[in-house]
Image (cartoon, rainbow, N blue to C red):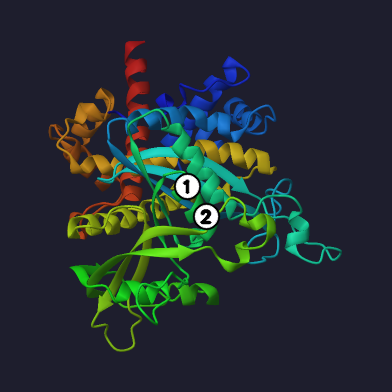
Amino acid sequence: MRIDIKEEFKGISLADRRLNKRVSQIAEQWSHAANASFPQMTGNWTELKGAYRFMNNERINEQEVLSGHIQASIKRAQRHQSIIAIHDSSEFKFKSAQAKKGLGRLRKPCQNMSGFYGHFSLCASEEGEPLGVMAMSQIVRKSRTRKEKSYRELRGNQPRESWRWGQQALAVQDQFANMSIQVVHVMDREADAYALYSLLCEQGMRFVIRATHNRKICPVQEHIDKLFDQVETSPMALKREVNLSRRRRAKPPQERKIHPEREKRTVTLGVYACPVTIPRSSWLDEGKKKSGTQASVVVHAVLVKERNTPPGEKPVQWVLLTSEPINTSQAIARVVDIYCSRWLIEEYFKAIKTGCAYEKRQLETGHGLFIALAICAVVAWQMLALRYYQKFSLKAEEIFTADEIQVLETQSGQPVISTEQALSLIAAMGGHLKHNGPPGWLTIYRGLCELRALVKGFRLAREICVQ
């Protein structure tokens, strides 16, 4: 069960065996000093030059670099009967002086900035264990010139960006094609598209997707032909009380509408569910657009809505469309819990951007940044996986090396027996205070980087003594 970053790259086969060794070495160095610069991370000019050459090598692509981790993730998934594949995209931006070639425009135009969008599929167990990244792709948006009237003209024959949701879900599903593992695909509001529902239903794939559009449905009751209205008329299946954290005012006006400011409060949620039939969208009824989509799809709708909202506050409300059963209150609760697990990928993006300082990497080309992202993707997964092992009564030697345990025992002055005890000491090294509650993954990882630096010194001292 020990997380050895080198094991995640054992299955790869690059153009040269020396490249296989190099990627493993870069990953280990990155995991030991995740937010350090490349010169600090590598430690000397020879190692730094080798790392830069590897990432700028045109014979390598990011899918090959990630392939070993995907194989290791599949092995971890085989311990479970059902897993969750969480799909989402994030924007990565860089100063133009850092990276010009191979990058594109951002969602919000910004002077001297360019970047790309990374689309990830992160798999986890239903209990919350991060199993690994199963797929990754990049989207580079070209800048429009004066001659081009629209971005549609600029795109030409290239597929629509929205197709990435279905294509990557199919790619993940194919990885488990010959296994008895049930995969539930989880997506946020951006994936709410009829063509995607049609594809998933046609392929017999399981999903939980948050709806953003109050779609027209085939009416069951008179005068009710809208999705949100239909599910709200259903009897309440269960109640839940949850604590909402405080949300600060978002800076971009568009995000203020999606994520309005709110104060910390305890809310009572009512959960409602019913089956609905969604007809094909009218814009898909013409010509070639009609081919490949079903005339209608039957899905289950689950509404999560706040009851007795305080004055001046916007009520919490989700509408989830799913293939999962809703015949009992336990089954409906499971659908809600599966969607709640989507937050793991938000933490994953934070691990990439903050924990690994990916957007500060000074590489000159998009290709180099994509290779770096494939390595960073594995390091970020390792950050999240460490916190998960806090929940279990494991022996310390199952997760940590003998040298790491010896250094912890020497520094703390007490024997380190369990993983929980070891992680508590490591979190303290990362700046965690006991009265602040359980430590987060970032604090644990900062402490782990500190521990690894001490272990490095310990091993050097041991070699000197032997000599």
Quadrant in which the C terminus appears: top left
Three-letter amino acid code at the position of disc 1: Glu
Q: How many numbered marks have been drawn onto this rendered protein structure?
A: 2
The picture places residue 154, in percent across and down from the top left corner, at 77, 57
Corner quadrant of residue 402: top left
**Front-lying residue, 99 or 64:** 64
Residue 248 % position (x, y): 40, 74
Q: For numbered disc 2, what is the local secondary structure?
A: loop
| Residue that sits furthest to the right in the current view | 147
The residue that label 1 is drawn on is 202
Identify which residue, 243 or 375, lies in the foreground.
Answer: 243
With 285 as the anchor, is 255 left or right in this view?
left
Left or right, 288 with reference to 405: right
Q: Are marks 1 and 2 in contact (CB under 8 Å)?
A: yes
Residue 294 is tagged as: 2
Query: Is residue 103 something that shows in the picture?
Result: yes
326 lies above or below 200: below
Give the residue type at disc 2: Gln
Residue drawn at (47%, 47%), measured in percent from left and top?
Answer: 202
Q: Upstream in the sequence, badge 1 or badge 2?
A: 1
How crowded is the residue under tag 1: few (<14 C-alpha within 10 Å), some, or many (20+)? few
Q: Residues within 10 Å of mark 2 (few under 14, many from 20)?
A: some
Q: Position of residue 404 (x, y in %)?
A: 27, 29
